[in-house]
Amino acid sequence: MDSEYHLDDLIQALATPRGRSAIAVMRVSGPGCIEAIARVFSRPDVLKKSEGYRVHHGWILDENGGRVDEVLVTVFRVPSSYTGQESAEISCHGGPAVVDRLMELLRTIGFRDAAPGEFTFRAFSLGKMDLTRAEAVREIIDARTDRARALAVSRLAGSVKSVIDEVKDAVKHQAAVASLALDYPEDEAEPVPFDSELIRVSRDSLMNLIQTWRTGRLYRDGLKVTFAGPANAGKSSLFNLFLREERSIVTERPGTTRDWVEAWVSLDGIPLQLIDTAGLRRETDDPIEVEGIRRTRELLAGSDLVVAVADGTEGPAAAVALEREEMTVLSEGAGIAEDPSQTGDRLIRVWNKSDISPEAPEGWIPVSALTGTGFSELEEEIRSRALGGGAAPEADAPVIDSARQKDLLERAVSALDRFSDGVGLGENAPVDLLAEDLHEALDALGELTGTVTRTDVLNTLFSEFCVGK
Amino acid sequence: MDSEYHLDDLIQALATPRGRSAIAVMRVSGPGCIEAIARVFSRPDVLKKSEGYRVHHGWILDENGGRVDEVLVTVFRVPSSYTGQESAEISCHGGPAVVDRLMELLRTIGFRDAAPGEFTFRAFSLGKMDLTRAEAVREIIDARTDRARALAVSRLAGSVKSVIDEVKDAVKHQAAVASLALDYPEDEAEPVPFDSELIRVSRDSLMNLIQTWRTGRLYRDGLKVTFAGPANAGKSSLFNLFLREERSIVTERPGTTRDWVEAWVSLDGIPLQLIDTAGLRRETDDPIEVEGIRRTRELLAGSDLVVAVADGTEGPAAAVALEREEMTVLSEGAGIAEDPSQTGDRLIRVWNKSDISPEAPEGWIPVSALTGTGFSELEEEIRSRALGGGAAPEADAPVIDSARQKDLLERAVSALDRFSDGVGLGENAPVDLLAEDLHEALDALGELTGTVTRTDVLNTLFSEFCVGK
């Protein structure tokens, strides 16, 4: 870990967002931090003698005994604290001037500002949580929708860790079998009694976890869904229907550009980033419009899904032309998109104004943005494409969303596959190499939960936390 | 108070600002709120049996037993809580999705969202704090500088209330004397034994408080200081010198207008809103420039202080012309300014580029924005004008900044003045009217601390609080 991260330093951070509010909470941690805080607290002895999980009312006083603020101080003792160290939380009035003065005062008595994620790093270093749970802490805070929160909370509760721990136990047991065989080569005539079935089951558990990654990412990062089509097709009406019907998370309407409008909504907990493009299609020489068209095409190419909205009243020919156009843009931009093989799968065809139009052509979803008819079919289509046809995960299912975890799981699976292949050779199985395969799998899983640590990985992981966590 | 403000309702609010952060704190209050929270807490019995000032670790669970978040719950029992009621604080992960889900869940078990200031209103209603201290809570949160915070903290600690209480005691005593005289009119031949000296001293205490109002407002709202003068005089260099030398609070540079640049700095705890104008002075027909000039003049007219920056190298004649110009603008705009009589006092004359200029004319402060020479003299001039020549208040001095408090103090002083005039009549003093004067003073002071309450006043006062306080 970074050399700045000395576990014995007294660290402090504002644990709540800056801004005017009822209260703000300062968090401090480190050996002796209660004694230090007591020096600026109006009831020092009470604080020093306090047990953990106790709250004390009083005033923070400056060097001259002047009142800084009326506060509540919560005391945490080893090991029952977030970091595992002696810690405290100071709950003060939520004013920026108060927070600034408090932080300044704490600096003068030996506290330094904590780095992002430093409290959680301490918790990890002192064995309070493994890396899958540490990552879950950040993921809970970053969750865009309630389902994303639920999946991250389930990871925090240990759903992923318990799968990994079970596999680790199985692999360790087989590694012990290999050790024994290597230590007592006299038995070499007999095939080593490996439990291939156990390793197969373990390998499948890991594969199942790997397969949750796509879903985990979906709930974490969401899906970019862009509306395309001619200006009169009713894209904006459809866009607004989503804002009305779905729970709108954040609505951003950049005032500086007229090119597109953007909003986040939640579709059964899947965050959708909806983008309503200006629908520029006509040939033009105006450099501003040309630039607008270029940006719209870029947007479409970079979208996870494109909803092509045809004006049903214009008849099937218009729909076919639109489809051809969008498919061209999508295949052009396939290089930008995540999965170029799915160019066609990214297009959803909407036959708008279905209430006053002839019947929709094959493959087009009839929708009336005006009456709302067909809207739930459109939602279902988006949901189904998003989940790749699968079902939404249970809220407490073990689901991973970290690329780091996925890569390590894949490393473990490869090692277990090599092991199984080797065991398949029967008497000729090279036991020393099989043992190596098992240790390779254990290393990958150890790195995943953090029992095997790599400084660079830890630095990256914790630097993504907010300060105060 | 507003009919929405039932003291027995279970209320909830997010007490920390919205946003991604290490933790967020939900605050709840109301009779039975601990029992209610226990229904969604993983360790209900622990919570129900908990004493006050205890913290409990656990999970908030939804209707189906699903984990919402890992939390710390702090229990407060009657009367040792902020509101004086049974209360709790739930410290959860600082993610918007967590906070939304928690608030939603609490609503389903009987909590309603608190109105702004409702927690403090309960504290006031249940006798936990008088109105001067309730107002101080908001003022601490709103404080722009450390000095403003210190003055508000001193009010919270009771500095203003103790002055008022002392005066109230004295006035009550005299009111009792008047009562006695009215009840036993047989003694009417003797003059009623009022203690005029006591009332005079009380009246002076109140006057002293009234006189702190200007200072209180100064530290609370700050001073608008606009730099004016020709484009080449070095206004921006001076402006930037302030940003470098003083502690910059918030720097706002509106990107949409080129008319002026604005920044807040703290001058010994006085918040200064510095405005650097474009310095448009020349005659023009361009409608955009005309509009710019109009806005600059409006800014100057609405400023508390105008720093006229002359280019010293252009000699005294240029300074005289500039002074005349600014005085004209200031007197034109006097209607907008707070105190029209002080037109001249609002102008500070700076002789910039003093390092390469002839000597400054009488009344001009020689400054070199380049070398920094004369900068502290300019600061001193601003500070002196701001404080009206007086000294800065001690951090723990009783200082008021509320217009409401000032008006009530003035009402009390008038009543006491009428009383003193009446007592001066000796034997002919109309005791019944004198008694009324004393009660009028007591009413005003009672309204100030909140023992006499007026619904409309309370509504206004508490609606200015943030939600959760």
Image: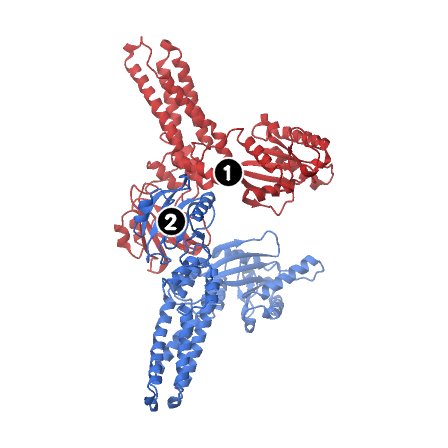
Chain colours: A blue, B red
Label 2 or label 1, whichever lies nearer to me, is 2
Q: Is residue B419 left or right of residue B390?
A: left
Q: Quadrant of residue A393?
A: bottom left
Residue closer to the observer: B43 or A347: B43
Q: For numbered disc 2, what is the local secondary structure? A: helix
Q: Which residue is mark 1?
A: B269
Q: Is residue A346 above or below residue B263?
A: below
Q: Residue B280: horizontal and vertical position, in percent?
A: 69, 38
Quadrant containing the C terminus of chain B in the rendered view: top left
Q: Is residue A33 left or right of residue A279?
A: left
Q: Please tell me how crowded label 1 is: few (under 14), some (14-19), or many (20+) other residues with Cα within 10 Å.
A: many
Name the image quarter holding residue B400. Answer: top left
Amino acid type, mark 1: Gly
Amino acid type of the residue tagged 2 in the rendering: Ala
Task: Point out which mark residue A400 bears.
Answer: none
Q: Nearer the viewer, residue A24 or B238?
A: B238
Q: Is residue A118 visible?
A: yes
Marks 2/1: CA–CA distance: 27 Å
Q: Chain of mark 2?
A: A
Do we see residue B453 in this rendering? Answer: no
Residue A220, horizontal then vertical, whole percent: 46, 63
Write down the residue under mark 2: A36
The quarter holding residue A451 reads bottom left
Q: Which chain is disc 1 placed on?
A: B
Task: Report helix, strand or loop for mark 1.
Answer: loop
Tell me: residue B452, above or below residue A318: above
On the image, the x and y values in percent for residue B79 come to 29, 41
Q: Are marks 2 and 1 on the same chain?
A: no
**Mark 2 packing: few (<14 Cα in 10 Å), some, or many (20+)?**
some
> Is A317 left, or right, of B444 in this rendering?
right
